[in-house]
Amino acid sequence: MRTTTAFFLSTLVSAVALMALAPPALAQRAGVTSKPLLRTSLSGDSTKESVLIAIEFSPGATTGRHSHPGDEYAAVLQGTLELRLEGQPPRRVTAGEAYHNPQGVVHETINVGETVAKTVATFVVEKNKPVVVPAP
């Protein structure tokens, strides 16, 4: 009985922790899925953490306009994305390329290709802050 209870509790705690890691604004957009891979304290700065997330975009899918309370560094693993940062011309990035979205800059990422696009993104944010902030 104790083993069953311990297993149930550890499974429940793991599920709740994973839900807390998921960036809500990305997870709620149709055609965009995110999978949290790692959340860890930043070395040398106990007030910040690094969050690593795998993101998939269906063809035509968009993140919608949003920003981040910290810097985003991402690598495109598959497909073609268009980055639309406020105040800058649109820029396309393809598999094998990387990009940076600065803290607080409103932007949108769109899969402009005909296949699924995949990225891995690292966000450097203050601890216990959301990773994604929807733009008004």
Image (cartoon, rainbow, N blue to C red):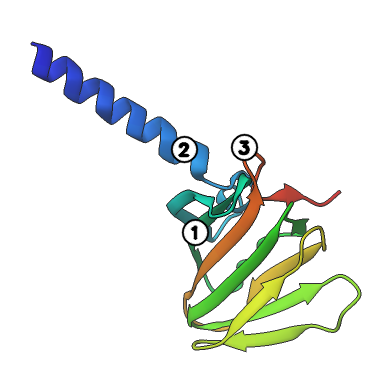
Looking at marks 1 and 2 on the same chain, the residue that comes earlier in the sequence is marked by 2
Secondary structure beneath disc 1? strand
Give residue 97's quadrant in the image: bottom right
- In the drawing, does residue 56 fall left or right of residue 131? left
Secondary structure beneath disc 2? helix
Q: Mark 1 points at which residue?
A: 52
Looking at marks 3 and 2 on the same chain, the residue that comes earlier in the sequence is marked by 2
- Assess disc 1: are there few (<14), some (14-19) or many (≥20) residues with their C-alpha within 10 Å of its C-alpha: many
Q: Residue at x 50, y 63 (%)?
A: 55
- In the drawing, does residue 123 fall left or right of residue 58? right
Which residue is situated farthest in the front direction here? 44
Amino acid carrying mark 3 in the image? Asn
Q: Which residue is drawn at 43% across and 35% down?
A: 17
Q: Which residue is drawn at 69% across and 62% down?
A: 71
Secondary structure beneath disc 3? loop
Q: Examine the rendered structure and indicate whether residue 102 appears above or below residue 28.
A: below
Q: Distance between the residues labelled 1 and 2?
A: 14 Å
Looking at marks 1 and 3 on the same chain, the residue that comes earlier in the sequence is marked by 1
Amino acid carrying mark 2 in the image? Met
Q: Mark 2 points at which residue?
A: 19
Amino acid carrying mark 1 in the image? Leu
- Assess disc 2: are there few (<14), some (14-19) or many (≥20) residues with their C-alpha within 10 Å of its C-alpha: few
- In the drawing, does residue 25 fall left or right of residue 21? right
- Pointer 3 and pointer 2: residues touching (CB < 8 Å)? no
Could you tell me residue 109's position as x and y percent? 68, 70
Q: Mark 3 points at which residue?
A: 128
| Near-viewer residue (40 or 46) | 46
